[in-house]
Amino acid sequence: MSDMLASAPEAPSLMTVRDLAVHIRTDAGLARILDGVSFSLPPGGSLGIVGESGCGKSTLLRAILGILPKGALVPQGQVVFQGQDILKTPVRGRIGFIPQDPYLSLNPVFRAGDQLLEGMRNHAPGTRDDHRKKLIGLFHAVQLPEPQNALDKYPHQFSGGQRQRLLIAAALACDPDLVVADEPTTALDVTTQREILALLRGLTAERNMGLLFVTHDFGVLSAVCEDVAVLYAGRVAEYGPTGNVLADPRHPYTRMLLACHPDRATDLIGIPGTVPAATAQPPGCRFHPRCPISRPSCAVTVPEMARIFDGSRVACPYHADPLPEVALG
Amino acid sequence: MGRYVVRRVLLALPALLGLVLLTFVLTRVIPADPAAMLAGDAATPAQIADIRSRYGLDQPLWRQAVTHVRQVLTGDLGSSIFTGRPVAEEIGFRLPATLELTFAALFLSVVLGIPLGLVAALDHNGPVDQIVRLLSVGGLAIAGFWLAIMLQLVFSMELDLLPLRGRIDIALGAPPAVTGLYLLDSLLALRLDMFGSALRHLVLPAVTLCLPGLASIARFTRSGVLETLQKDFVLYARAAGYSPFRLATIYVLRNAITVTVTQVGLLFGALISGAVAVEAIFDWPGLGTYAVQAILAADYKALLAVTLVVGVVYAVVNVLVDVAQALVDPRVAEQLK
């Protein structure tokens, strides 16, 4: 997998993740949450990380943000952000974070301002008054009603959509070069979702910020991200321009996952089996126990990331083989 | 917030009226006939009847109840049918003693229990956590009267560090009564010698009394902090760059102690009942010893007054706890709307 970056011409990169592994010690043994994950994001670009629950999306974000849980190990890999390995020397303030659930991500017993200003307090120059002014300005930009009073209200005095707007404003407050968003719209209803996504994409593009967007929803993905990395059981299965991957998925997992999507499937079928437990990853290709076209070698050899056509890469040597009809519904 | 406090106080009033009536009913259903007790074994039926009419015990029950409520509302708790002295006067002297003791114990429980619970949670399953767990199990398991006697043996008899019993050195006498709390009154009178003596007398009873509360507050705080640490907003706060110390002490603890604050309200009842034994052992002239005397003498007037006063104190403490809770968690005040 590491060869993919070596073979690619060195494009300007905002962030490059190289061969990243994150393991966590648990009572059930070593959980290999991420293994050999690589991708890169150009300045101002947008990348979606997509995968089922438990595939390692959130751990990837936490590694990038420098907030891995206790007991997490990084046995290999680098996260190079603006030329600096942030696993070794964390950068703060240049990466904004939009958490998953606006209802749970704000502490109910503190005023919104006390929490949202904390990032600026720690990472941005200027006085608290400067910070307040800046944040209120951003509240206008995210179209929050009554932006003047918002800092003095408690979280429960906002709706879910409004809270997500607060969090987006806070993520932009330190003028970061990269915004990392962890499924920021799953807790919201569909109409609010669309507004928030449009807002997020607009604001980051306008400010030339990179956007790393984690989701399990392909619909959301195509609206927001230029590139996509499909994660399966802690490894990248397929990686490329969103349009290509959605129109012509090559990895059996991506193909089946897209076939599961209610908008595309004729019948609702699933992928048989479940994502393996991180403490009991199968050898070889991690998808082989669930794969309809797996061969004996798949259980032995870890597939290399292979370039298939312009910009796309897939971790399956049999990506050109057709899948049986039944698997695709 | 102001409206919340007013509402909370108004809600406490019916409870207090209920308390007054209930204590009245309770004293009338006890089997002992107070008139006969007071008259003594050798009294004739005529003497008993005389006493009964003098104390109004021959009136219809509802009339007695009305009289009782009216008297209580005007602060007249009657006279002890045993000593003949006004009950209110006796309680006025003894209540501050009990309050001084229980508040000292409560203060120790909170001031030591919350930090202990916090450090235990931050060292989840580590050595500090184990030590705190041992202490809190011990604190709940050790009988107060046994501990009191051990403390007396060690600190008073053996080491001669602290006084054995009483509220203050008899040679000094009580400070001029303003609040009835010796620590406060001695400071108001600028008598540091009295303050020192009162404080030294307070240490052993307060330590004895605080232990179960200290243990349960430490446990509740620990589980509150552990639960709060799992929340998404803690992850978000870490991403925002909170230092671990600020995160633990300010950000997490405020959520975690909402449960602890409720616990303090419940704890207060346990402290007052625990004070009965502690007061007896340390010869502390509080409500507890008074109640014991009243029970033994079937002094129903005194008993009724003690029950009433404890009930009122409990109600007041609970209003304070509710207000404290609303201060800690802004959602509490809104829920009542």
Image: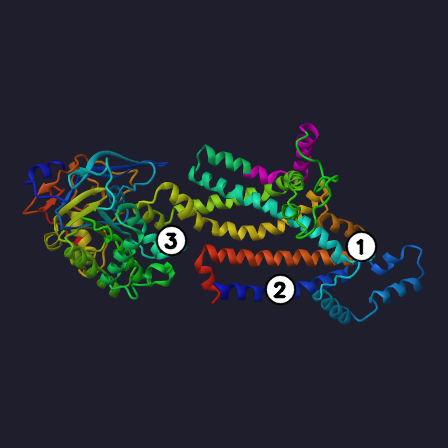
Indicate the position of residue A219 as horizontal and vertical percent values: 19, 58
Residue nearer the viewer, A282 or A74: A74
Residue indicated by mark 3: A107
Residue indicated by mark 2: B15
Query: Which image quadrant for residue A220?
Result: bottom left
What's the residue type where badge 3 is placed? Asn
In this picture, residue B171 sits left or right of residue A113: right
Q: Is residue B138 inside the magenta stretch?
A: yes
Q: CA distance from mark 3 to mark 2?
A: 34 Å
Which residue is at 65% across, 58% downward? B311
Give the crowd class for mark 3: few <14, some 14-19, many >=20 residues within 10 Å: many
In this picture, residue B315 sits left or right of residue B130: right
Residue A201 visible in image: yes
Which residue is at 30% across, 42% downward? A67
Residue nearer the viewer, A10 or B314: B314
What segment is highlighted magenta in the picture? B136-159
Indicate the position of residue B122 as horizontal and vertical percent values: 42, 39
Q: Is residue B197 inside the magenta stretch?
A: no
Q: Does A192 appear above or below A215?
A: below
Secondary structure of the residue carrying tag 1 is loop
Any mark on residue B298, and which?
Answer: 1
Any mark on residue A275, and which?
Answer: none
What's the residue type where badge 2 is placed? Ala
Tell me the subunit letter for badge 2: B
